[in-house]
Image (tube, helix red, strand yellow):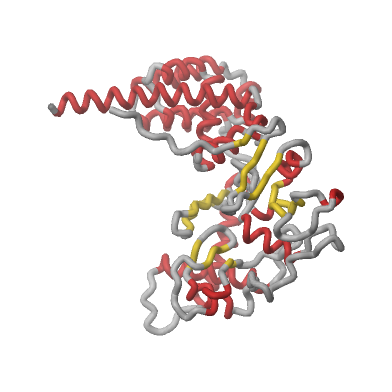
Amino acid sequence: MGGDVLDDVAALVAERNRVDALLARRVRAAELSQAPERDGLTSTASWLRGHCRLSAAAAGRLVTAGRVLEHLPALAEAHDTGLVSAEQVAVAGQILTPERLAAAAAAGVDLAVIDAVLTQVALDHPHADFVRVVRHYLADLDPDGPEPDPTEGRSLTLAKHADGSLSFRGQLDAAGGEKFQAAVESFVQADRPAGDDRTRAQRLGDALVQLADNALAAGDLPTLRTVKPHVAVVIDVEDLADPATGPGAGRMGFGATISAARARRLACDATVSRVVMGPDGAPLDLGREQRLADRYLRRAVELRDGGCVFTGCDAPTWWAEVHHLVHWIDGGETNLENSALLCERHHTKVHHGFRVERQPDGRWRTWRPDGTPITVPEPLLPRAA
């Protein structure tokens, strides 16, 4: 019985490898034919994020895999047959950056030989050995190490969870890391009350939030689309005034939901900008007297739309512009009802035949110039046994 189960596992892994190879090749074909342009998107990665609900990292891996299979045919064939995994293909992709391909060409490296060697190692050796071989090749290709450009060693990846909490991981060069530690450690050492039982990790987390608080309160951060960076919460006036906690009553600018109690606490802080959406709030209807959205209207549109409303686009608010649904020149008014948030690319698309429209339920829909709707597919259902 156990042997049969393990045989099934091995067969399924091989099948998954074959499907991954087929998917990567189709993604590459879509990229080469610029197919995402049909749905108003500029890259295959952005289409995968918006239409297949993939994370940015997963979409990037798929696009890279398609390029790897094109450049390394021996490894691609092994992947097609199910003998090489998508993870191995991703590791091999490190040798195919434009800079490394140029360095290999300058050194007279025959990529076909490298392809054959990597494929053999991938087939005959554990994954860790394959990783070491790739690293060894990269080290031989650039024995002096990377150029002393600090930005090459810096990265930060943010992952938003369903409850609005945030995880992140990153890497800094030595000098950048020293600056970061100096800034954060100053808050750690300045906040050590008697009886503090927080762990070191908790103190560092609190220090990072305090660093952000101070930067926002100072008011000298770069302005984003006429609006200074701020903590924003959308909450009904009734919930704001109600003494109950009201879980999930407020929606923050980056999409997280918080309780009414936490929203009230934020509203009490004088360093946090407050926007109350109600009949006595900021003037949101500017009529025909003003063509461009002022900062009050822009803030209201940002809070309502949360980013570009074009189907399949995940551009944040600070990439976006306020679009008149009925053009101002055609009699459209400058107010919340006639406004939509669109990134620069999709703002251009809408002015060249595409159309966005807000439905009665608050959701946005997008149509192509030929009148067909752009839709994000429903989640795939499992096949019946």
Q: Is residue 335 left or right of residue 53?
A: right
Q: Is residue 185 above or below residue 114?
A: below
Q: How many marks?
A: 0
Q: Is residue 323 left or right of residue 180?
A: right
Q: Residue 221 falls in which quadrant of the image?
A: bottom right
Q: Residue 369 falls in which quadrant of the image?
A: top right
* Residue 268 drawn at (x, y percent): 58, 80
* Residue 283 drawn at (x, y percent): 74, 70
Residue shown at the point (54%, 30%) measured from the top left: 64
Residue nearest the viewer, comparing 258 with 123? 258
Q: Is residue 49 left or right of residue 246?
A: right
Residue nearest the viewer, comparing 342 with 133? 342
Residue shown at the point (58%, 74%) measured from the top left: 237
Residue nearest the viewer, comparing 244 with 271? 244
Residue farthest bottom in this picture: 194
Is residue 144 visible from the viewing direction of this image? no
* Residue 286 drawn at (x, y percent): 80, 64
Q: Residue 194 falls in which quadrant of the image?
A: bottom left
* Residue 343 drawn at (x, y percent): 70, 47
Residue farthest left in this picture: 1
Residue nearest the viewer, comparing 100 with 203? 203
Q: Is residue 48 above or below residue 250?
A: above
Q: Quadrant of the N terminus?
A: top left
Is residue 49 visible from the viewing direction of this image? yes
Residue farthest front in this picture: 360
Q: Quadrant of the C terminus?
A: top left
Residue shown at the point (85%, 49%) measured from the top left: 330
Residue shown at the point (51%, 34%) measured from the top left: 61
